[in-house]
Image (spheres, helix red, strand yellow):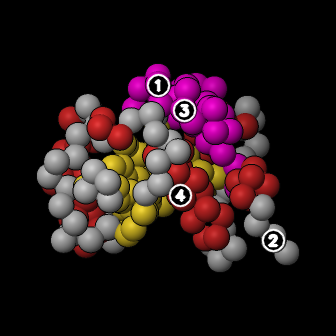
């Protein structure tokens, strides 16, 4: 595993050389992350590699809600009366120069630890991720996420599973 420092987004951190091989994810970090931070819409965290001297990866989070139809399909029941509150792991990417060094796992663990801590102060039923491709689906399922029955590119981890995984004591 290649150790990195994971820090909150700061516009002063140079992101221009970041390239994960997926232009949409690269572009978002370079051109939209700052605006999303300033608006309060997302929170972005950067993995800083001091050996490569740059951004090795990032993830972004935001709030999310599954509407009644999505919630019913997820649970296989029409008995749900309320939408499901959730947090969304909106993006997670690793620079190609840093691939296969465990940085994606470090970023995911950092995000999950933050979600577990937040669950002590904020009610939400699950963590949701919209996988970018099949490789991402494999990554998330390896780390305990379950695909939605009607859309295998969308995955979830219940807050109960999250707390058990991260070992957060709850009342």
CB contact under 8 Å: marks 3 and 1 = yes
Q: Identify the residue at image location x=65%, y=64%.
A: 116
Image: magenta residue range? 132-159
The answer to whether 54 appears left or right of 120 in the picture is left
Q: Identify the residue at image location x=72%, y=58%.
A: 166
Q: Which comes sooner in the sequence, label 4 or label 3?
A: 4
Of the numbered discs in the image, which one, if any, rests on residue 111? 4
Question: In the image, which is nearer the foreground, mark 2 or mark 3?
Answer: 3
Q: Is residue 154 above or below residue 121?
A: above
Residue 83 in sight from this viewpoint:
no
In the rendered image, which residue does mark 1 sit on? 135
Of 130 and 113, which appears nearest the observer?
A: 113
CB contact under 8 Å: marks 1 and 2 = no
Name the spot of residue 72 as percent of width and height, x first: 67, 38
Secondary structure of the residue carrying tag 2 is loop
Mark 1: few/some/many CA within 10 Å (<14, 14-19, 20+): few
């Amino acid at each position: 595993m290649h150790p990195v420092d994971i820090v909150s987004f700061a516009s002063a951190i140079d992101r221009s050389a970041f390239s994960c091989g997926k232009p949409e994810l690269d572009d978002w970090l370079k051109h939209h992350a700052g605006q999303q931070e300033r608006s309060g819409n997302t929170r972005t965290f950067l993995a800083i590699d001091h050996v490569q001297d740059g951004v090795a990866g990032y993830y972004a989070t935001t709030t999310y809600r599954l509407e009644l139809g999505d919630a019913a399909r997820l649970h296989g029941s029409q008995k749900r009366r309320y939408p499901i509150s959730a947090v969304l792991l909106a993006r997670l990417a690793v620079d190609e120069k840093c691939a296969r060094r465990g940085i994606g796992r470090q970023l995911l663990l950092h995000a999950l630890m933050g979600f577990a801590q937040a669950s002590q102060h904020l009610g939400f039923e699950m963590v949701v991720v919209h996988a970018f491709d099949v490789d991402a689906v494999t990554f998330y399922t390896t780390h305990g996420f379950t695909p939605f029955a009607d859309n295998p590119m969308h995955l979830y981890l219940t807050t109960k599973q999250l707390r058990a995984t991260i070992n957060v004591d709850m009342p």
